[in-house]
């Protein structure tokens, strides 16, 4: 067993303990929360090691890395969590079973066309902007992407009726400088309204290394963790 594998095992154990404690505090079952390992900039050897340690879901935010790693780890469920150019939709759909960052109608069309061409169904989450919960004197929230909550119904309807796509729920990133619990409570309200119209759209993708507890308290079903599992990211060349 390599030193790196030992490090990943230790990190994973700590992460699982954090998730378990957060679920207990929220009165939720641990089975309600899926851990998605975000492996951006890390080598595929780390992904294989995490899979061997029991990780079942992995995510990437760059198309280039997804298409490099996914073929080497086909047993993992791959999630795409980054900003997506429509021209790269088919490449993403080829490898990912879920796209967490749908934020415009043109992307729905591109993903639908790609899913039909690949003869598969892709679960799509609407990325919601929580910028309103960020500091009033900073533009940090807007840079994290997503649509305004008021735009969610139109985008949801487009996904729900698109060939090859399945409306999965919502995703968000807490704005820098915000109180994560308040931001994620806002997301929970958006998710609740969405489920009233689309009962199957029951995913809430929220929470990263620094705020997973707040996300789980507010109903997150998927937490996206990179640094806590893999450490400080190496610089891209």
Image (cartoon, helix red, strand yellow):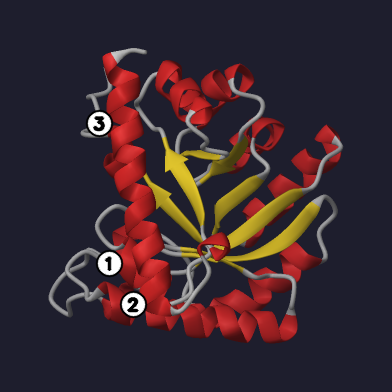
Q: Nearer the viewer, residue 171 or 217?
A: 217
Evaluate whether residue 148 shows in this view: yes
Residue at horizontal 45%, vertical 79%? 27
The residues tagged by marks 3 and 2 sit, at their Cα atoms, a distance apart of: 26 Å
Report the residue marked by disc 1: 175
- Which residue is painted at 42% across and 40% down in the image? 38
- Hey, which residue is sitting farthest left in the picture? 137
Task: Give whichever of 37, 71 is nearer the camera.
Answer: 37
Q: State how far apart marks 1 and 2 are (Cα).
A: 8 Å
Q: Label 2 neighbourhood size at 10 Å, few (<14), some (14-19), many (20+)?
A: many
Mark 1 or 3: in front is 3
Taking the image as shown, residue 154 lies to the left or right of residue 29, namely right
C-alpha span from label 1 to label 3: 21 Å
The quadrant of the image that shows the C terminus is top left
Q: Element at badge 3?
A: loop
Element type at marker 1? loop
Q: Position of residue 140 (x, y in %)?
A: 22, 63
Where residue 154 appears, x then y in whole percent?
A: 67, 76
Image disc number at residue 233: 3
* Residue 183 numbered mark, or none: 2
Asked if the residue under mark 2 is in contact with the one under mark 1, i.e. CB atoms within 8 Å, the reply is yes
Residue 77: mark = none
Name which of mark 1 and mark 3 comes first in the sequence.
1
Name the quadrant of the N terminus. Answer: top left
Instruction: Look at 85% across and 42% down and name the residue there.
Output: 116
Image coords of residue 75 (percent x, y): 66, 28
Q: Are marks 1 and 3 in contact (CB under 8 Å)?
A: no
């Amino acid at each position: 067993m390599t030193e790196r594998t030992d490090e990943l095992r230790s990190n994973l154990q700590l992460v699982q303990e954090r998730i378990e404690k957060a679920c207990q505090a929220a009165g939720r079952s641990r089975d309600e929360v899926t851990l998605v390992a975000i492996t951006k900039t890390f080598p595929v050897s780390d992904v294989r090691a995490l899979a061997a340690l029991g990780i079942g879901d992995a995510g990437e935010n760059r198309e280039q890395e997804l298409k490099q790693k996914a073929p080497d780890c086909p047993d993992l469920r791959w999630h795409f969590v980054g900003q997506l150019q429509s021209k790269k939709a088919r490449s993403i759909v080829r490898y990912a079973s879920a796209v967490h960052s749908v934020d415009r109608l043109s992307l729905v069309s591109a993903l639908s066309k790609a899913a039909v061409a690949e003869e598969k169904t892709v679960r799509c989450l609407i990325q919601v902007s929580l910028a309103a919960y960020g500091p009033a004197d900073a533009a940090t929230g807007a840079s994290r992407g997503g649509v305004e909550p008021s735009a969610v119904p139109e985008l949801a309807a487009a996904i729900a009726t698109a060939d090859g796509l399945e409306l999965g729920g919502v995703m968000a990133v807490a704005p820098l400088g915000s109180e994560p619990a308040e931001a994620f409570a806002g997301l929970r309200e958006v998710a609740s309204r969405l489920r009233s119209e689309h009962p199957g759209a029951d995913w809430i993708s929220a929470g990263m290394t620094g705020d997973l507890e707040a996300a789980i308290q507010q109903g997150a079903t998927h937490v996206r963790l990179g640094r806590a599992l893999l450490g400080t990211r190496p610089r891209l060349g």
